[in-house]
Image (cartoon, coloured by chain):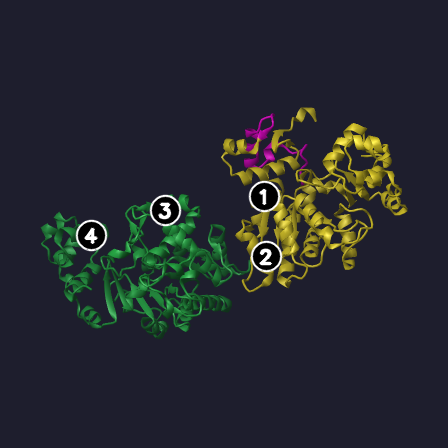
Chain colours: A yellow, B green
């Protein structure tokens, strides 16, 4: 848990322009920690490789915290997670770019639980809304976190479905975490904070500008094991989220519909491009190799922690995979050969095993077993 | 054109039990022609390799023609096509098993025109029926023959769509060609005879027994470039037709629908297994590389014959393929390498080029160009 001084420094950094997270990582190493970076002289920052724009900002009048920021940080339900925090979503760190810090309102621990993105049109059919609600309720009941974008339509139905199951749900915003959009979703956002988390990569007070949504969609795709598109027109934001998910190697699910419904066109396009045609929520659990980890009836409370889970309770395939994995970092390709499983299956099982703490990712997309006795 | 004596002999052979068509081909070679086979002594038939059951039949009292058979053959609209007839469907000869002779009522020439099978449930939704009709109408207008099974529901709608476009349609029966089933489709069958053909591999008078339908489905799949499944439940006859088509290397198309409709389940299963998700009739033309061969507005009458078609009117990809193909028989695999096209595309373009008379199939799945000056 970072000190409040550290947190304040991260708030400043989260507002810095042109801050490449890889350069920042190097600067943190050179200058000690985040307080070192924020307090450093311009020459030191230049030596550490920070961009001129970032340096100008850090030595300028905007580097100090605003009253609103201090008030926001005072609320115990609010968290700023730097990318160095173990609670920062691990799956997001595996993507090409991620915010240096994330604003979280609610429970930051759900961000590293296995999660499915459920997205779609802001103006769905009644059937589409119902499908989003039903699938999310079913999956949340079985322990999957439902992540979406708090928009009207499919997004809201997905969040509500997870809430109805007493499951966890994460809403990723295209605005500052203190700017709830659309306004009619303020009560929903309040419920989500109590049963999951609101998440934003933008500084406080950022309005929901159209240009923010690609980053928002990247967080939705990047923090989840897969993305389900319920209803989407061609050339819609949901397809961007879906393509980002595919580019991160995550699973893609799409629900088919009538050839006469414009809101099925986007889903059909995704299916043609390789997304799994999805008829039931069970299809998704099967594809994620997820069923064995959770008791269908017990709900989120019954989820075993990685530490307490006896090996005997593991899915057979997961055990085979763990047995095939040594304590030296191993390529996924090698695991495919050793186990005879399909590459996609190995990849999704490894994500789950990582989230459950059984394995850890090493540089170059390799994995190794977690040595229990050293934990 | 066979003589009537030859035709009568083929009627007899079409009724012979346990008649393997490959053995029959050998016997025809040894004994001269079909009259030689039907009139041969038992010892000669045994020497030619015919089965005991076939020999018993040919020397027994049932070998002679019935009055009904003679009457049927007297009608100039009726044809019996032995597999040695150039009008016998060439695509069917490329399958593993085919009837030694086919009963045809109507125009036998359509059997070698490019054709699409359109099949589906006998109890479709109103929407499914409309889709079958619309797609068939659109495709028949552009010169594709629509082949189906004369059943109620999707099959009937497909035939009617083709008829509405003044296009050609073929109905393949699971009974003798003189046994129209269901009876309510007699007027439809009459129309089909005038604008295409009825087709059966069964002797006259054969009732529509359930065990006949696999062979009927094999003819539907075997005579066509591809199969479109409009609406089908899981474990339905349409899926059998679809799987046969796939096993013959033909294209498979399926129309998606609501996840709540049991009649979409079969289509969704096919899409998951690799069938093309089909939203429009244009998708089918594209996939078959068919568009360039036919003028969209002109209808069936405007179809160019292979002999008159100038090379300049050819689809660019077809020309590339022809250029890559020598006059020596060439493997499809070699063509894939030479052209850089996908194997499925090469395979479907070769079927069209063959039907159009530009190339000919050689043994072992190889192809060569047709030498024009020798025709």
Pick whichever of labels 4 and 3 is earlier in the sequence: 4
Q: How many marks?
A: 4
- Residue at 83% over, 31% down: A43
Highlighted range, magenta: A303-330
**Mark 4–mark 2 contact, CB under 8 Å?**
no
Residue A288: numbered disc:
1
Write down the quadrant of residue B253 in the picture: bottom left
**Mark 1–mark 2 contact, CB under 8 Å?**
no
User: Disc 4 to disc 3, how far (Cα)?
Assistant: 27 Å
Foreground: A343 or B58?
A343
What subunit carries mark 2?
A
Tag 2's secondary structure? helix
**Mark 1–mark 3 contact, CB under 8 Å?**
no
Q: Which residue is mark 4?
A: B25
What subunit carries mark 3?
B
Q: Quadrant of the C terminus of chain B?
A: bottom left
Q: Does the magenta-highlighted stretch encompass residue A312? A: yes
User: Disc 1 to disc 3, how far (Cα)?
Assistant: 38 Å
Q: Which residue is mark 2?
A: A266
Crowding near the residue tagged with mark 3, few <14, some 14–19, many ≥20 C-alpha atoms within 10 Å: some
User: Disc 4 to disc 2, how far (Cα)?
Assistant: 53 Å
- Residue at 13% over, 59% down: B35
Q: Which residue is mark 3?
A: B332
What subunit carries mark 4?
B
Tag 4's secondary structure? helix
């Amino acid at each position: 848990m970072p000190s409040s001084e550290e947190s304040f420094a991260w708030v400043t950094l989260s507002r810095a322009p042109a801050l490449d997270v890889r350069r920042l990582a190097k600067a943190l190493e050179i200058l000690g920690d985040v307080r070192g970076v924020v307090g450093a002289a311009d020459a030191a920052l230049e030596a550490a490789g920070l961009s001129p724009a970032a340096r100008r900002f850090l030595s300028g009048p905007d580097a100090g915290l605003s009253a609103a920021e201090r008030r926001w940080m005072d609320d115990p339900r609010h968290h700023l997670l730097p990318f160095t925090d173990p609670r920062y979503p691990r799956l997001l760190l595996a993507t090409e770019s991620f915010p240096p810090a994330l604003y979280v309102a609610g429970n930051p621990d759900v961000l590293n639980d296995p999660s499915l993105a459920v997205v779609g049109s802001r103006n769905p059919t009644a059937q589409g809304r119902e499908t989003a609600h039903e699938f999310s309720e079913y999956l949340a009941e079985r322990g999957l976190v439902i992540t979406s974008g708090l928009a009207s339509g499919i997004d809201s139905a997905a969040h509500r479905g997870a809430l109805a199951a007493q499951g966890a749900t994460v809403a990723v915003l295209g605005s500052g975490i203190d700017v709830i959009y659309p306004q009619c979703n303020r009560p929903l956002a309040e419920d989500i904070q109590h049963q999951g988390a609101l998440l934003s990569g933008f500084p406080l007070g950022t309005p929901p500008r159209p240009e923010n949504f690609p980053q928002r969609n990247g967080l939705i795709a990047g923090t989840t094991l897969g993305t389900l598109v319920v209803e989407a027109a061609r050339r819609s934001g949901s397809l961007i989220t879906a393509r980002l998910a595919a580019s991160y190697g995550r699973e893609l699910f799409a629900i088919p519909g009538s050839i006469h419904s414009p809101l099925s066109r986007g889903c059909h396009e995704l299916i043609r491009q390789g997304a799994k045609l999805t008829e039931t929520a069970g299809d998704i659990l099967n594809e994620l190799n997820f069923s064995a980890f959770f008791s269908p009836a017990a709900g989120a409370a019954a989820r075993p922690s990685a530490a307490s889970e006896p090996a005997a309770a593991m899915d057979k395939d997961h055990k085979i995979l763990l047995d095939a994995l040594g304590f030296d970092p191993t390529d996924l390709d090698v695991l495919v050969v050793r186990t005879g499983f399909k590459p996609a299956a190995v990849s999704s099982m490894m994500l789950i095993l990582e989230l459950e703490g059984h394995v850890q990712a090493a540089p170059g997309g390799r994995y190794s077993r977690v040595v229990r006795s050293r934990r």
